[in-house]
Image (tube, rainbow, N blue to C red):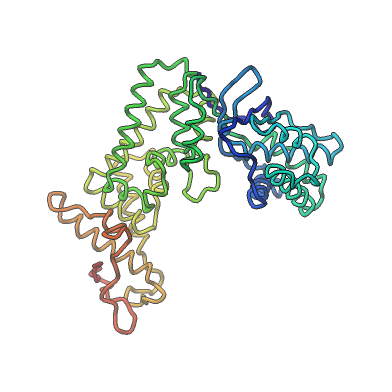
């Protein structure tokens, strides 16, 4: 029976068996420091509470009550073990030692070395070398942080109250070696979307019938397939599809308010996991996901919504999350009125400024936005029976890059436009 949940780092417990199909510990200085810095950056400042954060998944297969085969996450788990070991030894037992242990099928000496690290033995084998180096990186990082004991207690508190791991316990009949290959050799990490899907389809969801789970699986695939239509995808986003391993992430991220530059890769999964933990009905939650996807499709199929929303997104003035938020709790008329306001604001002049004052050197973004609006609005006013502006080709035409360029720039570098009629040059 598969199991998918989040747990605080401080709650990780048990014995983790690293099978022979995995290599040993290989994290270098950069990875170890990044983990420590990401965690330490969560601490609250100026009376503000600490932020929450979710590490990448630990994928395991249960062997007995407290023993697991570690399929994915060896590098993170070993580093956490070493951090706890350092904090325990420096605090002389004030900080508890690690509550988990690692054992190795083909490298039994590594288990003993982890328990009693002797850096003088680092050259005995490659595993000892990387483990000893990581220990020195951890020690040096804490020393450089200043107020050493305070830093240690801060990290310990964050591990106990703010930093979670995604715990993915696969079915007993899962081919662990094959899954490891997919996750590591194939360089295809688990995405938030895969984890959200697993949460809906997990065997532990006893309140959801197998038939309902089959329906969700089919609808999931249909949504993913629909989003592979570039005319829909590039109407909704300016981001190249290769930034998403699965396109349904766009819908899920929209609901969790996750931005593309969010450093917490699994924020979306964390959002849905919290809803599940608080007892939200998963069947109704899935229905909400479907409704939001259908809303986006409705916008795509409406000539008016398509061009107004498409312009705001393509111009970079608003992103889909902003527009989605504006649509909530509004009638169709109210939402259209708000879209018109945002469009006017996107090209609004200030003070005594007029369009002929715009200079290509300093105002190229504003000029491009106005020219794009002219093109989009020209198409929209021709009516839906004529044509629809091709946002996919505008954004990624031909060679996969935006090949449209500004034309009709005044010889002195000024923008050629009419301040009264709005007649402007065109995008070629």
Q: Nearer the viewer, residue 294 or 268?
A: 268
Q: Position of residue 54 (x, y in %)?
A: 59, 38
Q: Quadrant of residue 247?
A: top left
Q: Position of residue 358 (x, y in %)?
A: 36, 75
In the visual, does 106 lie left or right of 122?
A: left
In the visual, does 389 lie left or right of 191?
A: left
In the image, farthest residue toward the front: 124
In the visual, does 51 lie left or right of 428?
A: right
In the image, farthest residue toward the bottom: 412
In the image, farthest residue toward the right: 92
| Residue found at x 13% / y 53% | 386
| Residue found at x 60% / y 20% | 63
Q: How many marks?
A: 0
Where's the C terminus, which quadrant?
bottom left
| Residue found at x 38% / y 48% | 320
Q: Nearer the viewer, residue 264 or 408?
A: 264
| Residue 207 drawn above or below residue 175 | above
Q: Nearer the viewer, residue 327 or 315?
A: 315
Q: Position of residue 168 (x, y in %)?
A: 54, 28
In the image, farthest residue toward the left: 385
| Residue 348 drawn above or below residue 98 | below
């Amino acid at each position: 029976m598969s199991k998918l949940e989040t747990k605080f780092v401080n709650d990780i417990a048990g014995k983790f068996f690293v099978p022979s199909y995995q290599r040993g510990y290989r994290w270098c200085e950069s990875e170890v420091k990044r983990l420590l810095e990401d965690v330490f950056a969560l601490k609250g400042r100026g009376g503000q509470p600490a932020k929450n954060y979710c590490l990448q998944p630990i994928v395991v297969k249960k062997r007995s009550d407290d023993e697991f085969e570690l399929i994915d996450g060896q590098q993170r788990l070993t580093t956490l073990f070493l951090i706890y070991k350092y904090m325990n030894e420096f605090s002389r037992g004030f900080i508890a030692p690690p509550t988990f242990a690692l054992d190795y099928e083909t490298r039994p000496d590594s288990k003993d070395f982890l328990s009693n690290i002797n850096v003088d033995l680092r050259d005995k084998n490659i595993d000892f070398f990387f483990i000893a180096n990581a220990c020195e990186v951890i020690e040096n990082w804490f020393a450089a942080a200043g107020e050493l004991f305070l830093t240690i207690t801060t990290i310990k508190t964050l591990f106990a109250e703010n930093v979670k791991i995604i715990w993915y316990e696969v079915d007993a009949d899962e081919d662990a070696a094959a899954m490891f290959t997919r996750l590591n050799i194939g360089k295809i990490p688990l995405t938030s979307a895969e984890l959200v899907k697993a949460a809906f389809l997990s065997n532990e969801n006893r309140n959801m019938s197998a038939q309902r789970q089959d329906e969700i699986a089919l609808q999931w695939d249909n949504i993913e397939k629909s989003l592979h239509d570039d005319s829909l995808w590039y109407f909704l986003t300016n981001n190249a599809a290769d930034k998403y391993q699965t396109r349904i992430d766009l819908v899920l991220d929209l609901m969790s308010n996750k931005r593309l530059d969010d450093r917490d890769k699994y924020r979306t999964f964390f959002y849905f996991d919290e809803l599940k933990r608080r007892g939200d009905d998963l069947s109704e939650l899935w229905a909400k996901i479907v409704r939001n996807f259908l809303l986006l499709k409705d916008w795509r199929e409406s000539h008016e919504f398509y061009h107004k929303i498409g312009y705001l997104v393509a111009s970079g003035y608003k992103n889909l999350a902003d527009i989605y938020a504006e649509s909530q709790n509004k009638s169709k008329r109210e939402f259209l009125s708000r879209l018109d306001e945002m469009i006017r604001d996107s090209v609004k002049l200030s003070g005594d400024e007029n369009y002929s004052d715009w200079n290509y050197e300093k105002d190229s973004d504003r000029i491009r936005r106005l020219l794009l609006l002219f093109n989009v609005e020209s198409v929209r006013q021709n009516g839906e029976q004529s044509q629809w502006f091709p946002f996919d080709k505008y954004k990624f035409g031909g060679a996969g890059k935006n090949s449209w360029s500004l034309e009709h720039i005044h010889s002195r570098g000024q923008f050629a436009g009419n301040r009264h009629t709005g007649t402007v040059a065109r995008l070629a």
